[in-house]
Image (tube, rainbow, N blue to C red):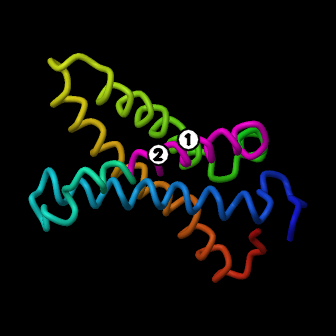
Amino acid sequence: MNSASRLGQMPSWQRHFVLLAMLSCSLTGIAYLLGHEFQIERTLLGTHSVLAWHGIAAILATMALGSILPFHLKAGIKSKRKLLSGLSQLAFLATLIISGALLYYGPEEIRDAVITTHWIIGIGFFLIFLFHGVFIRKHLVSNGKKVH
């Protein structure tokens, strides 16, 4: 399907772009968190190149967010479907964008608190994203409801 035929439904290309961008950002962030903060496979996961890929993925995720704001968000608010998970994602993404900017441009005194905030919110976002976009869809499909 190339165009949205239902309220809030994204075109196929946009859905794939949003999924790829958000999952790439989340997974590279989790990889860096495991390597850098938790010292798990640090020489592989905690490297600058993983952090750089996370930054590139974050730019794409921000573009994906911008692509859904005018239509998907407005339609979701109107329909009140998945409203809590959708608005939670929006709040978490805003916090991630701000904390990500503070990690690079913010004062050194708040850096440790910002790092902690960024990864806790990031993990929360990832879980809500999966719930909102993947698990709810599979649950509705398995219960015989039509989902696009």
Task: Locate residue 132, reporting x and y percent.
Answer: 56, 58
Q: Position of residue 21 (x, y in %)?
A: 54, 56
**Residue 58, numbered circle:** 2
| Label 1 crowd (10 A; few <14 / some 14-19 / many >=20) | some
* Label 1 element class: helix
Q: Which residue appears at 74% of the width and 46% of the height?
A: 72
Q: Residues within 10 Å of mark 2 (few under 14, many from 20)?
A: many
Which contiguous range is marked in magenta? Answer: 54-72
Q: Amino acid at mark 1?
A: Thr
Q: Is 11 or 86 nearer to us in this picture?
A: 11
Q: Residue at x 32, y 21 (%)?
A: 105
Q: Is residue 73 magenta?
A: no
Taking the spot 49% from the left edge, 63% from the top edge, the residue there is: 130
Q: Which residue occupies the extreme front position in the image? A: 49
Tag shown at residue 62: 1
| Magenta span dominant secondary structure | helix
**x, y (%) of residue 117?**
27, 36
Question: Gap between marks 1 and 2, in whole Å?
Answer: 6 Å
Question: Along the horizontal axis of the image, is 68 left or right of 110?
Answer: right
Tell me whether circle 1 and circle 2 mark residues in contact (CB < 8 Å). yes
